[in-house]
């Protein structure tokens, strides 16, 4: 075999080896991407749950504030009302 044909054969073998190696690495990355995507989906679910809990807590706090405002108005009315003289 001539020197040029040997170099071409060696170059082809190296090319095939590089291609096989890079394709094998892609399969590994696919597994890594699937694992990362799964973690992101889990985190997204947790964030949505936390957001719903926060919204619920906010609504409860607003209701409690409304009740406190009502009670405060009633207390002020009672404190500013004229004193009643006891009978008897």
Image (spheres, grey):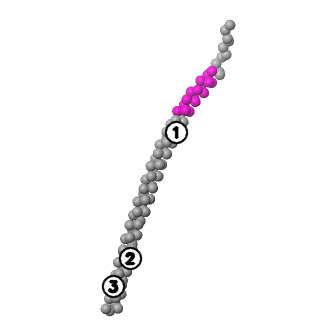
Please determine whether, in this image, residue 15 is positioned above or below residue 28: below
Please determine whether, in this image, residue 68 is positioned above or below residue 6: above
**Camera-nearest label, 2 or 1:** 2
What residue is disc 3 on?
9
Q: Position of residue 1 (x, y in %)?
A: 31, 91
Query: Over which residues does the magenta segment extend?
Result: 63-78
Q: Is residue 88 magenta?
A: no
Q: Regarding mark 2 in the picture, which secondary structure is present there?
A: helix
| Labelled disc at residue 18 | 2
- Residue at the spot x=47%, y=49% of the render? 46
Q: CA distance from mark 2 to mark 1?
A: 58 Å
Query: Camera-side residue: 58 or 77?
Result: 58
**Camera-nearest label, 3 or 1:** 3
- Mark 3 closeness class: few <14, some 14–19, many ≥20 residues within 10 Å: few
- Mark 2 closeness class: few <14, some 14–19, many ≥20 residues within 10 Å: few
What residue is disc 1 on?
57
Magenta stretch, main secondary structure class: helix
- Residue at the spot x=52%, y=39% of the render? 57
Q: CA distance from mark 3 to mark 2?
A: 14 Å
Q: Position of residue 39 (x, y in %)?
A: 45, 55
Left or right of 68 on screen, residue 32: left
Left or right of 28 on screen, residue 65: right
Q: Position of residue 34 (x, y in %)?
A: 40, 60
Q: Regarding mark 1 in the picture, which secondary structure is present there?
A: helix
Please determine whether, in this image, residue 7 is positioned above or below residue 74: below
Query: Camera-side residue: 45 or 71?
Result: 45
């Amino acid at each position: 075999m001539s020197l040029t044909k040997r170099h071409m054969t060696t170059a082809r073998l190296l090319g095939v080896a590089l291609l096989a190696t890079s394709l094998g690495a892609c399969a590994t990355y696919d597994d890594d991407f699937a694992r990362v995507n799964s973690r992101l989906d889990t985190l997204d679910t947790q964030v949505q749950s936390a957001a719903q809990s926060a919204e619920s807590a906010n609504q409860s706090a607003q209701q409690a504030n409304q009740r406190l405002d009502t009670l405060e108005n009633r207390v002020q009315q009672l404190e500013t009302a004229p004193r009643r003289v006891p009978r008897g």
